[in-house]
Image (cartoon, grey):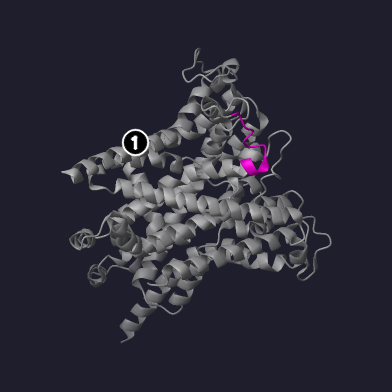
Amino acid sequence: MKNIRWESSKIIIMHIVLILGGIAMILPFVWMFVTSIKPSTEVLSWPPSFIPKSPTWENYRTVLQEAPFGRYFLNTFLISTISALSILFTSSLSGFIFAKYEFPGRNTLFLALLATAMIPLECYMISLYLLINRFGWINTYQGVVAPILVMAFGVFFMRQNILSIPNELLDAARIDGCSEWRIYTTIILPLSRSALGALAIFAYMNAWSFFIWPLIVINERSLYTMELGLTIFQKRFTVDYGLITAGSTIAVLPILVIFLILRRNIIEGVTLTGLKG
Amino acid sequence: MNKKRSRLNNFYLFCYIGLLPTVLLYFIFRIIPIVDTFRLSFYSWSVLGVGNKFIGLENYFKLFSDKLFITSLVNTTLFAILVVSFSVAISLALAIMLNNKRMERFSPIYELIYFLPVVTPMVPVAVMWKWIYDPQYGLLNYFLSLLGISPRAWLVYPNLALYAIVIMSVWKIIGYYMMIFLVGLKNISKEYYEAALIDGAVGGQVFRYITLPLLRPIVLYVLVVATIQAFNVFTQVYVMTSDIQGAPGRLVRVFVYDIYENGFRYFKMGYASAEAVILLLIVLALTIFEFRVMGKED
């Protein structure tokens, strides 16, 4: 009896802790939005008001006049899409080959991939910059996207998934006269659909928050990504928090909408890809 | 016989052609720059291309008498220790709470909420926290004033700013690690717990002798990822501290910021490469260390 009561109060305490933590998670977002619909006089009022007295979309109008966030969005979208498609293709094909084939040099290649997988971009961005510069790719889309066209973790992740596809299935297809490429397109790809979905989400998320590299290779405004555009914007209007938070809201909104629609897929995709890779 | 051979050749051909795009892209945009970074670090180099010459280890010697570099090394290490320990501890605690059987019904909504900051890119997150930390009108100072604590200029003083950025970074990432721990906890077979209960184990003991050892690979994974990420901290520092009047980014100088500035503002590419090599060695050493300590019983 005593035990049951202890269990119940334990659950209540856990809820309290989790709810308080949850408020801390949401509050910055709410505060950002609330600030963005305040007129500038109210932004700088003390004590701060949580419900705007005279809400206005003025800040948004100014932001969209001052900075082409639509363009930034399209740039980010384009870069992320190219990156994700390339990662999906290269990861699934080489994951398949590493999982299902024996060939000379396989282990060496796989080890080389494994050994360098952990090294972050920040460690070699200088040389990479010089290389991209030599290609004449500064201020181009291909320059931004170059380092995120393959993902070693993606290869491991796809290999891990494809390992569980039975070999008999592949052999049966071979007996029916399927080429290896046909096996890849008609058996492997459809059977790893959910893994590919998870990887796609992971790749998109990585590319979307890509920051230091675009900062280095892009200095033309029309090529700014969302992240870069927002950074420059908030530097220009350092103290005008109505405008800055409106800009941030514009940057965050599409992501939140997609997240709320695909919530389970995104949470699982991001978690599992990291874990299994 | 002949047919079998051509089939085998076909296999190989498919393997090599199939791997070609991956290997090529990986080699050109990753392996070559990594190797080249080591080479560059022995050169005195400028982007203008004049006076590039081999100077051996001089860049490295210079680094260790460079005050800014030492500061950035200290700051980054402190940042990493704080962020890694707090985020791992908090997210593990959250995951254990959510793993409770009677939490099952509510778990998805909590997961959703705690994952919000994870999916939000770093720049908008840094911007909203910069506003929260605002010395005059910030929300944090408002809450503190309710508790009778006088306002602080969070992002202006180097020490305070470091902690402010730590808090924000922990806030951003705990949802991610929480989910990873939760997956790990769900994979622990119920039988272990039942057996422990029969043997009369109580709460703390169950955690110490069952949960933790079985979770070890996951904890190791999170530790490695968190450490690497923390040592590469850049975006939030760049956004939050680089433009406050009177306090440029030099104050909370972190490793990657130092590389960035030396390489792309002063164009000391060789010098910055030497720094990058040190960063790489630190990341490598820490990863190996964590594997040694955590993975020894596997």
Q: Residue at x 31, y 67 (%)?
A: A163
Q: Residue furthest right?
A: B51
Q: Is residue B217 above or below residue A45?
A: below
Place of residue B102 in the rendered image (x, y in percent of width and height, measured from the top left):
23, 43
Q: Is residue B179 left or right of residue A167?
A: right
Q: Secondary structure at mark 1?
A: helix
Among the 4 quarters of the image, the one containing residue A11: top left
Residues B194 and B239: in front is B194
Q: Is residue A103 above or below residue A116?
A: below
Position of residue B256 relative to residue A220, above or below, is below
Name the residue furthest left. A1
Q: Quadrant of the C terminus of chain A?
A: bottom left
Which image quadrant is residue A241 in?
top right
- Number of marks present in the image shown: 1
Magenta residues, dominant SS class = loop
Residue B238 appears in view: no
Q: x%, y% of residue A224?
A: 60, 39
Apparent side of residue B63 relative to residue A247 in the rendered image (left or right): right
Q: Quadrant of residue B212?
A: bottom left
Position in image of residue A223 (x %, y %):
61, 40
Point out residue A89 in the picture as x, y percentages from the top left corner: 42, 57
Chain hosting mark 1: A
Query: Magenta region: which residues?
Result: B150-160
Position of residue A263 in the picture relative to residue B119 (left or right): left
In the image, B164 versus B249, the foreground residue is B164
Which residue is more in the foreground, A56 or B202? B202
**What residue type is disc 1 on?**
Ile
Q: Residues within 10 Å of mark 1 (few under 14, many from 20)?
A: few
The residue singled out by tag 1 in the image is A16
Can the viewer see residue B29 in this picture? yes
Residue drawn at point x = 47 percent, y = 70 percent: B292
Q: Residue furthest top?
A: A54
